[in-house]
Image (tube, grey):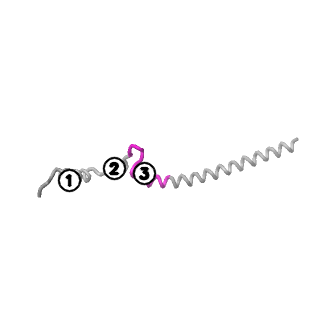
Amino acid sequence: MVFKKIDVIFFIYLYQKYKYPVDKTRVNEFGQGGEEEDEVTKTKSSQSSTTEELNKEIQNETKESREIEENEENESKKTK
């Protein structure tokens, strides 16, 4: 069995892959990590529910502020 240079390099490559596995938590140059994608989808779904809750709160606050303005206008009209 004759080993060529490419065979030796391939075995070194295999040994390095075995000895030094890929770090899934490492962040690349774009700021993205390997395991982050599952967390991102979970975060997006929780953010969408949070966004919906915030939208409902904003709608409630605008309704309340409109009611307050209407009450103030009615009171000012009554006093005149």
Which segment did they paint magenta?
27-43
Say whether disc 1 or disc 2 marks the residue closer to the N-terminus: 1
Which quadrant does the N terminus fall into? bottom left
Task: Give x and y (percent) for residue 53.
Answer: 60, 53
Q: In the rendered structure, find residue 23 and report the number of the disc placed on it.
A: 2
Q: Is residue 65 left or right of residue 5?
A: right
Task: Give x and y (percent) for residue 9.
Answer: 20, 50
Is 21 in the magenta? no
Q: In the rendered structure, find residue 65 and report the number of the disc placed on it.
A: none
Is 40 in the magenta? yes
Q: Amino acid at mark 3?
A: Glu
Residue at the far top in the pictured view: 80
Q: Amino acid at mark 1?
A: Phe
Say whether disc 1 or disc 3 marks the residue closer to the N-terminus: 1
Secondary-structure class at tag 1: helix
Residue on which disc 3 sits: 36
Residue at the far left in the pictured view: 1
Residue on which disc 1 sits: 11
Q: Residue at x 12, y 56 (%)?
A: 2
Secondary-structure class at tag 2: loop
